[in-house]
Image: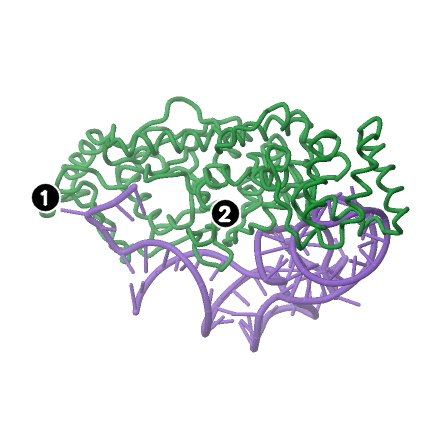
Chain colours: A green, B purple
Amino acid sequence: MAVRVRIAPSPTGFLHIGTARTALFNWLFARHEGGEFRLRIENTDTSREVAEAVDQIQDSLRWLGLDWDGEHTFQLDRMDDCRKVAEQLVADGKAYSDDGAIRFRMPNEGSTAWDDVVRGRVEVANETIEDVVLVRSDGRPTYNFASPMEDVWDGITHVIRGDDHISNTPKQLNIIRAVGAEVPVYAHAPMLFGTDGKKLSKRHGAQAVEEFREAGYLPETMLNFLALLGWAPDGETTIMSRDELIERFSLERVSPSPSQFDYAKLDWMNGVYIRELPLEDFAHRLVLWLGENGYEWDAELVARTAPLVQEKIAKLSDYPGFAGFFFGDVEPGAADLDGGGPMLAAAEETLASLEPFEAEAIEAALRAAADGLGLKPRQAFQPLRIAVTGSRVSPGLFESMELLGRDVTLSRIRAAAAVAA
RNA sequence: GCCCCCAUCGACUAGCGGUCCAGGUCGCGGCCCUUUCAAGGCCGUCGCACGGGUUCGAAUCCCGUUGGGGGCACCA
């Protein structure tokens, strides 16, 4: 039988990074097996907030490239079906009314067990499982009833979810058996923690997929990084493309122990992916990111600066601070210019008539000028860097000068010389 | 309180009884390269939570302890 899995986020807001990881495992499994990956929204009302949250969740999934099969479904749409099943359960004596609600009669003796793909056999004594409410007194089915029923109706073969659902599983198992349906295979993936070992939350930094996007991470980075949280194909491989991930993924290799979200490693990996990008692609992504984040910078200029920054930034969001001097005036700090007067003057003189005004020639001329003043390159070029880029850290000085052009370069050097003197 | 899950370097992990005085990656430290910052190259630091078993042999299996986490709603 073909594999079918689902991700079932509740429309409470943005797509949480932990949910995204669970979605990724489901998607990887489905694609690896040639099965289906469904999107089910576990809503309980139809408010406008819900509609927006659904859009947001879908945007995030699309950005990550986690495409789902068929139309997404809403839990709310199956309320009536759930009620009918509950009534039948009551008629069969498997459930009973309780103050207007309907409760499921859990077995009192023995135990409920399943073979979890990532944890092995899990067994729970039935006497510890309460009679759960199936339908509230206002007629709405509860999560522990609606969710397994939808899994049955949708023909879900594997339920891959966070291990915070382990204690729900025996309840859902008994309900599914009571309606005479076949139980799916369960795989409980470990949770994601923040750097302090606590549940990932706001204070750890970004936690919604959308926030990572705004922070300038690439979707391929997120996919690769998230896949490695709780899963590894072997002990060596770290960087894997989407296709390689699909090819190598298996539920059996998912680890049962929780993992911490390491932002430093994420930054490193994003740098790897940025450097691997073809230049035009990198430039394109910079332009897109800038546009999405309120920078109205000339796309052509951005493209020309791209080769100067590709090796040096870890996130797209580093670009404005690193290359902003190409797009606006600079204000070099007087302290950083201290002692740079002679070199600034020498640079102004040599660059004024230099032909051609290109990086290679600029470098040769400036090295000669530094030599003439008896300065080491390190001492000589730093005041120039401050003057031209306004910062102690920048893209290559000579390439930057070429891009800026003679006029801007010279005027910035003159302005700095005035401050330094 | 009760139930369940988890436990290898600071982090992510490999390891599924001998090939491990534990390997890879990030981070960290040092060196090299160098116009800054990165990148890159080289070297290094750091770990099987603890206690009992089982076995000729345990990071690997079993039990317990400790520590962490999740759940016990007419939330999802």
Residue A192: give x, y in percent of width and height: 47, 50
For residue A335, side relative to residue A108 (left or right) = right
Q: Provide the residue designation for mark 1.
A: A100
Dot 1 amino acid type? Gly
Residue A324 location, quadrant: top right
**Does residue A94 appear in the picture of this structure?**
yes
For residue B31, side relative to residue A161 (left or right) = right
Q: Residues within 10 Å of mark 1 (few under 14, many from 20)?
A: few
Q: Residues within 10 Å of mark 2 (few under 14, many from 20)?
A: some
Q: Nearer the viewer, residue A92 or A79?
A: A79
Give whichever of discs 2 and 1 has the lower sequence position. Answer: 1
For residue A279, side relative to residue A112 (left or right) = right
Q: Nearer the viewer, residue B17 or A227?
A: A227
**Does residue A249 appear in the picture of this structure?**
no
Contact (Cβ within 8 Å) of mark 2 with mark 1 = no
The circle on residue A118 is 2
Residue A175: give x, y in percent of width and height: 28, 41
Front tag of 2 and 1: 1
From the viewer's perspective, is residue A55 above or below residue A389? above
Q: Chain of mark 1?
A: A
- Residues at discs 2 and 1 both on one chain: yes
Residue A81: give x, y in percent of width and height: 22, 29
- Residue drawn at 23 percent across, 48 percent down: A132
